[in-house]
Image (cartoon, rainbow, N blue to C red):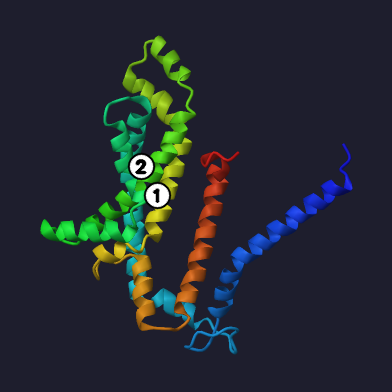
């Protein structure tokens, strides 16, 4: 069917609007990208002279390296714990009815409405009262609390769309409950599990406000290291760090998309 003039105008106006939105979103990054090549120690735009010195400084600064390693450790451990615990809670909330179900769901979802700095401060007070050291495990505990609701909702949605007749068919053929769980339920929930773990890892890696209360010099995460740097210096190093971070994340997402197809994992096909 041939499109009318109105349909063509609507199509082109939608493309123009989408381009404007993308340009608006990418404009701050473009400014930071250009500013990161500034030769001067004073952050200015546009640069008068161009240099890569701040990229070298970003790579050589020791706190950034230590913070990056800590953030990778914390995000990996927190995402793993959150995926295991969140999957269990989602399964219980979806499959069973009990008197305290609504209360349990409200408690598990409460980190979505409680400010992150409140969670961090609360864990700091609790750990101090219990004489617990501020190790990396305290940071992991804070991050698990924060990202757990996202894993629960992701897996819960997958369970809501789950076709239970597959499980019933396996049970009717004599499969034990554990075998049904391992061979039917979990494989069909893989998209929800992966998307939940992905969200958890990203949120954990970028978490700052709660981490600020529970880290020390040895356990500071990458965002906290960036915050401490900008408190002491005002040069374009953070602009260089931001560019490196964005490019690294984009490259990682392209690799993940190449092998796992993000639209399938995130159920947006």
In the foreground, 180 or 127: 127
Which part of the image, by quadrant, shows the N terminus?
Answer: top right
Residue at point 36% right, 63% down? 208
The answer to whether any part of residue 22 appears in the image is yes
To which residue does mark 1 refer? 200
The answer to whether any part of residue 77 appears in the image is no
In the foreground, 17 or 214: 17
Which part of the image, by quadrant, shows the C terminus?
Answer: top right
Percent x, y for residue 123?
22, 57
Q: Is residue 253 above or below residue 268?
A: below
Dot 2 falls on a residue whose secondary structure is helix
Q: Is residue 47 above or below residue 13?
A: below
Q: Quadrant of residue 28?
A: bottom right
Q: Quadrant of residue 170?
A: top left
Dot 1 falls on a residue whose secondary structure is helix
Q: Is residue 157 above or below residue 31?
A: above
To which residue does mark 2 refer? 83
């Amino acid at each position: 069917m041939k499109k009318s003039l109105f349909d063509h105008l609507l199509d082109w106006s939608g493309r123009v609007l989408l381009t404007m939105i993308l340009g608006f979103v990418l404009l701050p990054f473009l400014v930071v990208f250009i500013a990161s090549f500034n030769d001067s120690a004073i952050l200015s735009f546009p640069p008068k002279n161009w240099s890569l010195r701040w990229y070298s400084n970003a790579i050589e600064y020791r706190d950034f390296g230590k913070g990056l390693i800590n953030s990778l450790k914390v995000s990996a451990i927190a995402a793993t714990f959150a995926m295991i615990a969140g999957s269990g809670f989602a399964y219980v909330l979806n499959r069973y009815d009990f008197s305290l179900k609504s209360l349990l769901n409200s408690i598990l979802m409460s980190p979505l409405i409680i400010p992150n700095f409140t969670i961090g401060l609360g864990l700091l007070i609790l750990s101090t009262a219990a004489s617990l050291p501020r190790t990396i495990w305290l940071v992991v505990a804070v991050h698990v609390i924060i990202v757990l609701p996202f894993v629960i909702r992701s897996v819960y949605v997958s369970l809501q769309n789950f076709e239970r007749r597959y499980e019933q068919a396996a049970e009717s053929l004599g499969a034990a409950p554990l075998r049904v769980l391992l061979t039917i339920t979990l494989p069909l929930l893989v998209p929800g599990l992966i998307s939940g773990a992905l969200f958890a890892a990203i949120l954990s890696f970028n978490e700052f406000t709660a981490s600020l209360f529970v880290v020390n010099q040895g356990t500071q995460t990458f965002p906290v290291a960036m915050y401490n740097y900008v408190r002491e210096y005002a040069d374009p190093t953070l602009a260089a760090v931001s560019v490196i971070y964005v490019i690294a994340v984009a490259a990682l997402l392209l690799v993940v998309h190449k092998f796992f197809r993000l639209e399938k994992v995130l159920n947006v096909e």
